[in-house]
Amino acid sequence: MSKDWKSHKAEFFQLYTVEGRTLQDVKGILEDRHGFIASTRAYRMRVDEWGLRKYKSTKNHVPQKMRKTDHAKPHIVDLTTPPPDVVHPSYTDIDFPDGTSIPEGPIKASELRSLVPGNWPYTLEVFLIKWQDDGEYLKTILDVIATGQHSEFILRRTVAIQPGNNLFRILQYKVAIHDQAVLSKALLNSVSFPGWNNNAIWSNELFVALRTNEWKDTRRIMRNPEIHRAIGSKVVDYALGIIGARLLDGYKIRLQVHDDFFGLIHDKPTIVDARAYLDIMYDLERKGLTVDPVYYRLSLRLLPLTGLHLPSFGAAFQYEHQVDLHGQPKGTLAQNPMRKSPTAWQEVERVFT
């Protein structure tokens, strides 16, 4: 069966020719994003067939201080259509709406941070555009995010790429796969404003979901296909994990109030909170999202309280020792008599749906 190379040509061109990624990187990215699988030899054949050449290196370029220009409009690059064979500047050479311009070519993360103003709206975008997989860019951008100065701009529209793009999409194009999770989660944890210059439904919905106190509202909002299209399903899962952990912490505090010397009090508020807690745990487990083992320890105490007769969640025993109903070590995984069973999962689905 012939591969549909044509539909991936634009992205291939962008990754290999414009961004200068290796064929192995391009191969891995297309497999991860689109499930497009082909041999390295087939990739080399496409390079020869299409006459692709990487842009000339700019390693010897000495960056200048960010300068004001007379340009009022951003330089927009359409990633959907490959440009002609003539060599154009990379989209890392860009003017911003406020008239600021960043230098062309590679630049060290420390130098870039010294060039951009502390509260400049486009700082995070510039770091992603200029991204280098050297460890320093990740460390520096995490430090920048931690300052909180840019949290209101995380859900904004980007200006470097075609209108409608966002930081999460640039991240998926520019950042190595092994660093995408930690950076995506850092951005999501820092969101403090719906979208600044962004009137898109997805940004407002995501902001509400990140602030909601009800898991049922989270599930409803995060099913919105516009959110999935805008930021990708992986980032949606990261968001669910973050929201779920926050809500679990809240239920833990409330349940501790009902925990006396003899154990959890069997009253209606406690049982309602316990079921809500297990509801979140069940959803996260079903989606394959792992949380800290401490959440599973409490789950073991809550199961008898709710009247659900089911084995503990599968991931509860992925750490070294099994724990008893009070969170104390008890045997090993191999000795664990509590295993998943279809009947148990059907009972959970019956109660929670």
Image (spheres, grey):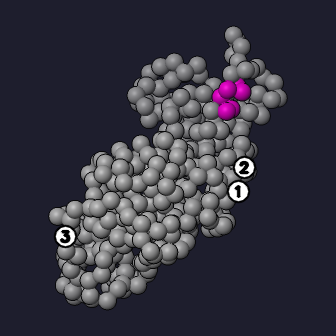
Q: Which residue is mark 1?
A: 220
Q: Secondary structure at mark 3?
A: loop
Which residues are drawn in magenta?
A: 250-255
Q: For the stretch drawn in magenta, what is the main secondary structure?
A: helix
C-alpha gap between disc 2 and disc 3: 51 Å
Q: Which residue is mark 2?
A: 216
Residue 86 horizontal/vertical position (percent): 26, 88
- Dot 3 amino acid type: Ser
Reply above or below: 5 against 310: below
Residue 308 horizontal/vertical position (percent): 69, 35
The one of 233 and 276 positioned closer to us in this rendering: 233
Please give left or right for residue 183 compared with residue 87 in the image.
Answer: right
Q: Which residue is mark 3?
A: 57
- Dot 2 amino acid type: Lys
C-alpha gap between disc 1 and disc 3: 48 Å
Residue 293 horizontal/vertical position (percent): 50, 31
The one of 297 and 304 positioned closer to us in this rendering: 297
The one of 305 and 247 positioned closer to us in this rendering: 247
Q: Please tell me which residue is depicted at 71% across the width and 38% down the height of the picture.
A: 276
Reply above or below: 111 against 292: below
Q: How many C-alpha atoms fall within 10 Å of the one at disc 3: few (<14), some, or many (≥20)?
A: few
Q: How many C-alpha atoms fall within 10 Å of the one at disc 1: few (<14), some, or many (≥20)?
A: few
Q: Please tell me which residue is depicted at 62% across the width and 65% down the height of the picture.
A: 198
